Amino acid sequence: MSSRLSSASPASLRDDLQAQIHLMQGKRGSERSLPVLPSLSRLLPGGLRPGAAYSVQGSMSLAMALLAGPSRNGSWCGVAGLPDFGIEAAAGFGIALDRLVLVPDPGPVGCR
């Protein structure tokens, strides 16, 4: 861990992370955003970008929490490459299972 990270305040780390997320998302003014759960709204104040793919490593709970906001609002969501994704846990987060596409093993990556 770098000394900058170990000495930074939680608010400073949050602000840095928010700035990086906004740069990566490249939001357009006319594009609507997808809502996130209230517990994630300070981290992602602009919500999620429709049609975007997000990758979460190390926390299935965070992945489910990210899906829950858009799902509760009527959006379709998809999960690929997570064979251990638990649908009971997903339902517990509020993910609408009738609008969830699961692809446990998407197969090899690349063109054929």
Image (spheres, rainbow, N blue to C red):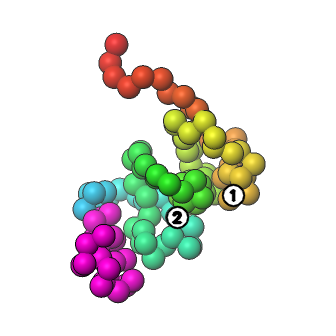
Which residue in the protein does label 1 denote? 94
Check disc 1 and report its element: helix, strand or loop.
Answer: loop
| Horizontal and vertical percent position of residue 96 | 68, 49
The reply to whether residue 15 is in sight is no
For the residue pair 45 and 16, the one nearer the viewer reads as 16
Say which residue appears at 51% left-offset and 70% top-offset: 40
Classify residue 9 by image quadrant: bottom left
Specify the principal SS of the magenta part. Answer: helix
Q: Is residue 108 left or right of residue 30?
A: right
Q: Which percent across, then down, holds residue 61?
A: 60, 58
Image quadrant where one finds the N terminus = bottom left
Residue 23 vs residue 98, the one in the foreground: 23
Task: Write down the residue under mark 2.
Answer: 36
Q: Is residue 57 left or right of residue 87?
A: left
Mark number displayed over residue 85:
none
Position of residue 35 relative to residue 12, above or below, is above
- Residue 103 forms part of the magenta stretch: no
Residue drawn at 38 percent across, 25 percent down: 109
Residue interval drawn in magenta: 1-22
Residue at x-position 28% and y-position 65%: 20
Residue 79 higher or lower than 59, as above or below? above
Q: CA distance from mark 2 to mark 1?
A: 12 Å
